[in-house]
Image (cartoon, helix red, strand yellow):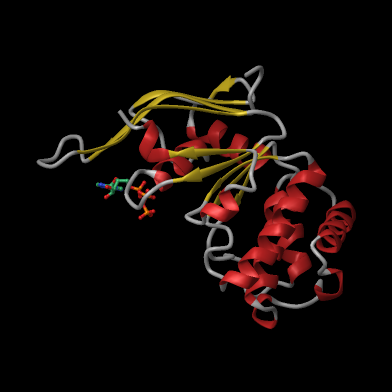
Amino acid sequence: MSDPVLHLEGIGKTYGKDGPAPVAVLHGLDLAVARGEVVALVAPSGAGKSTLLHIAGLLDTPDRGRVLLKGRDMTGLPDKARTEARRRDLGFVYQFHHLLPEFTAAENIVLPQLANGVGARAAAARAQDLLGRVGLAHRAGHRPAELSGGEQQRVAFCRALANAPALLLADEPTGNLDPETSDRVFEVLMALVRETGLSALIATHNHALAARMDRVIRLNETVA
Ligand SMILES: Nc1ncnc2c1ncn2[C@@H]1O[C@H](COP(=O)(O)OP(=O)(O)OP(=O)(O)O)[C@@H](O)[C@H]1O
């Protein structure tokens, strides 16, 4: 694969290395996500899905192997550089929306842009554009508590894309919703990802959703 957005090379992690019961996970995992590719990550509980997403998201470091983001080796960089890369190049969506309750939908999408140095007017315009893409232009002024679960999650997608990241990392992005809403909201996410040409690594237990992505990686098959 030429020039992947994310390349994990020989990743291994051991929890509690110096204690009486070390737990080794990932066992030399290799994984690459190409530009514009949407990859599903399917893993049984405990296989290391969260560990992998934390390492790919530069929130944790592996004990062996390298993490390359847009070709740049992130392993061993100081925390400040990793935080900057995370803010600039990565978008995150979790099972629960984690929106700031005291701010409106639009403000939740504006704030990360301001933190990245975008001007207030441009940030507001981008928030409105993203909300329009997920069918929520008319709810821009509402706070999270005034929105349904599916609407909250759609706002969270917009927030993740606010700074036009190179890669979206999502952990069960519709796992908190009932099956019907999950399907509809997942469609919205996929449309958003496709329209923006984003690369994505999306963990899900839902095999039907996984089958709709470009490629499925099963974590249990990649362990040694
Ligand atoms: N801080 C820690 N200390 C010791 N073991 C840990 C720690 N964090 C995770 N583990 C272990 O590492 C393994 C992988 O954990 P991880 O959270 O990545 O799994 P997961 O695939 O995300 O599971 P789930 O889908 O249930 O959330 C598990 O066996 C877990 O118990």
Find residue 34 and report its horizontal and vertical position in percent. Answer: 65, 28
Determine the image quadrant of residue 64: top left
The answer to whether 14 appears left or right of 2 in the picture is: left
- Of residue 109 and residue 92, the one placed in the foreground of this image is 92
Q: Quadrant of the C terminus?
A: top left
Which residue shows up at 81% across the image and 63% down it? 131
In the image, taking residue 197 as reference, residue 83 lies left or right, namely left
- Name the side, left or right, on which 10 lies relative to 141: left
Q: In the displayed structure, does residue 71 sit left or right of residue 53?
A: right
Q: Quadrant of residue 136?
A: bottom right
Q: Position of residue 196 (x, y in %)?
A: 80, 43
Residue lying at the far bottom in this picture: please name it.
146
Task: In the rendered view, tell whether residue 109 sits above or below residue 22.
Answer: below
The x, y position of residue 217, in whole percent, is: 49, 37
**In this rendering, does residue 206 appear at all?**
yes
Residue 162 visible, this angle: no
Instruction: Tell which of 185 and 113 is nearer to you.
Output: 185
Please state the horizontal and vertical placement of residue 95, each as a whole percent of the image.
53, 61
Q: Residue furthest left?
A: 20
Q: Is residue 3 above or below residue 222?
A: above
Q: Where is the N terminus found, in terms of image quarters?
A: top right
Residue visible at 37% across and 50% down?
A: 44
